[in-house]
Image: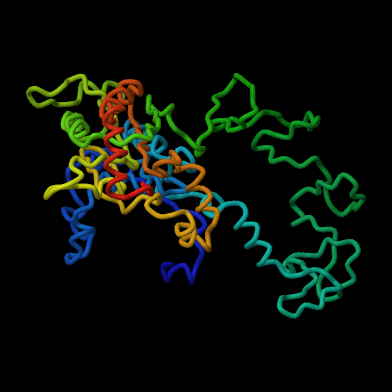
Amino acid sequence: MQHKATTLADITRVVTVVDACTFGTDWMTWNTAGDRDGWVDAADDCSAQRKVPELLAEQVEAADLLLVNKIDMAGKEQVAVASSVARGLNKDADLFEVEFGIISPKEILGDGIIKEKKKEDKSCSDPDCKDETHDHSHSHDHDSACADPDCTDDSHEHSHSHENESSSCSDPKCTDDSHEHSHSHDHDSSCSDPDCTDTSHEHSHDHDSSCSDPDCTDTSHEHSHEHKKTSHDKLGISNFVYKAAIPFSPGRLLGLLNQWPVPIKEDLNIEVLETPKAVYQFQEGLDSDSPFIGVLRSKGFCWMAPTKWTGLAEDTWRHETANYWSHAGKHFGIQTAGKWWATLPKDRMKGYFEGNMKEYDRILREDWASEEFGDRRQEIVFIGASIDQKAITDALNECLLTDEEMAVYRKEAEKVYGAAL
């Protein structure tokens, strides 16, 4: 069911504003939304339980445009961390570092929307158009003279326009002697026309500020692309997706996750990103070489095997139930996330996508891990600083069912669910 807001407006771009001053501390806080004044309705217990770092991560991940704001108030380190982590969380969004949230509407709305708006705002200048739904006019700015040499409209002044008498005419073909003709430049500043050969003024590639020409090779000045998309080389932030088509043993996975390292820092700063092993605390007996050191964010779907197929404490529901893995900052959790699509026959599943067959095709193409078990799978993305992909992969692989355990799984699942696993 669509939200009622979608009947009033279309969402074309999602913009997330990141506070560079508080991003690091909010990422490392233990707070939930309910701990923050005014964040949620007092009666909304569900929203109150949401973790602040998780909300922060989800808003960054959902954005088409990221604005890292308050760079004038935050230190360089804070800006670098906020930009780098935001880029690590969302590599596809446009990212800008800004002050006071100032940015061109073109960047927010996109070229296509701006051009369409301009097109709508313009009066129609087609002399043969008889459409009465829009304004027809011979378009001139009538506060100034019309410069169209072929115009015969007597409602306005016609002249060879030169703005005012004190400014020079720059039309090379003009033969009007009533005004000055010159190769027009503001001679208080340098001429930046690369084709100009007039020796009466200075020519230079203007570098009063940093040069933003991406093709410039002039080494006499600084090149920087201010207000461009930036990542600060990600400060070593990388990501990978762990995938497997075999269920986890809940017991072995729980044992691994109980070793999850907790940062002792209250702020996500350069030290955390550059030397992650130096900022974690470990309880006595825990592995100080945890493969998860440096992981800032992890999320995705995971598949758990039942621990008991029959009896009072049976948990066969695990076979049908998807689990959502979500970790951000110091918070970690695994929650149920509905049933796997593979619990339905494909013809019945297709009925849920009558209005969106592209999504149905995408699920079969991208999420179907095997014909035997459908979309049941492990698919978890890990994002962090100096993370060890092999160590994480090896540790999680140790939690997967063995071949012998999978043989039991198949046998027990067939008893409970029949041929349709």
Q: Nearer the viewer, residue 351 or 98?
A: 351
Q: Quadrant of residue 251?
A: top left
Residue under the point 81% across and 46% down: 170
72 displayed left or right of 34: right
Residue 116 to residue 152: above or below: above
Residue under the point 81% across and 78% down: 130
Residue 274 to residue 60: above or below: above
The N terminus sits in image quarter: bottom left
Asked whether residue 250 appears in the rendered view, the answer is: yes
Residue at the far bottom in the pictured view: 132
Q: Nearer the viewer, residue 278 or 322?
A: 322
Residue under the point 22% across and 40% down: 332
Question: Which colour scheme appears in the figure?
Answer: rainbow
Q: Nearer the viewer, residue 409 or 380?
A: 409
Q: Position of residue 43 (x, y in %)?
A: 17, 67
Asked whether residue 52 appears in the rendered view, the answer is: no
66 displayed left or right of 320: right
Q: Quadrant of residue 164?
A: bottom right
Total marks shown come to 0
Q: Position of residue 296 (x, y in %)?
A: 29, 34
188 displayed left or right of 283: right
Q: Position of residue 302 (x, y in %)?
A: 31, 40
Residue under the point 36% across and 50% down: 340
Q: Nearer the viewer, residue 262 or 337?
A: 337
Residue 208 to residue 107: above or below: above
Q: Position of residue 322 (x, y in %)?
A: 31, 47
